[in-house]
Image (tube, grey):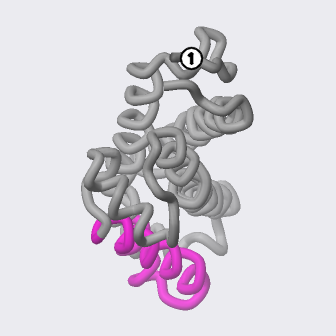
Amino acid sequence: MTLDPAVSLRLAFLIRVVGRESDRLMLTDQRLFALPFDVARAERLSADPDLAERVEAFVGRFARLQDTLGDKLIPVLLSALGERSGAAIDNLDQAERLGFLHSVDQWLAMRQLRIQMVHEYVEDPVILAGALQSAHAFVPSLLSAVGSIRDEVARRSWLMADGSGAVTR
């Protein structure tokens, strides 16, 4: 299948971006959750700037990777595959059907966690601790989606070895 050069370049760019975002999320996840994130840790955030920065980094990186995947990479991938790209929920349904996501319901639950992690950050340490622990449990699903998409792109030889776009078959 021959890809439009613009699609190929955009796909290559987004694959590189999610690769970097995944690496950064994994690093922050490992550092933040080296110890369980419980209510006591959430209550210490205002007194522990290093911990607060790690929480901010985790929340931002979790959200950014989910946004890049759902709002940018999945629609471009669907287009490259000859699938119709449409509303976000429809794109997620197609990505699940094609095996790139485990579950749309899980994806929507991750989206809800983002809201809790951001809006409850200062207000309720119990909700924040629970949301962070749940998000931590979802990190493997996000990384799996990245891996599935990268594998599909590699299987189709849509990128050159250096990660740049390649117009192929």
Residue 111 drawn at (x, y percent): 46, 72
User: Is residue 34 placed above or below 126 in the rendered structure?
Assistant: above
The residue furthest bottom is 123
Query: Type of residue at label 1?
Result: Thr
Residue that mark 1 sits on: 168
Residue 109 covered by magenta stretch:
yes
Residue at 63% from the left image edge and 55% from the top image edge: 57
Report if residue 106 is visible in the image.
yes
Residue 155 drawn at (x, y percent): 39, 20
Relative to residue 19, is residue 47 drawn left or right?
right
Of residues 122 and 148, which is closer to you in this image?
Answer: 148
Residue at 31% from the left image edge and 66% from the top image edge: 104
Of residues 5 and 103, which is closer to you in this image?
Answer: 5
Q: Which residues are magenta?
A: 105-133
Residue 12 quadrant: top right
Residue 115 covered by magenta stretch:
yes
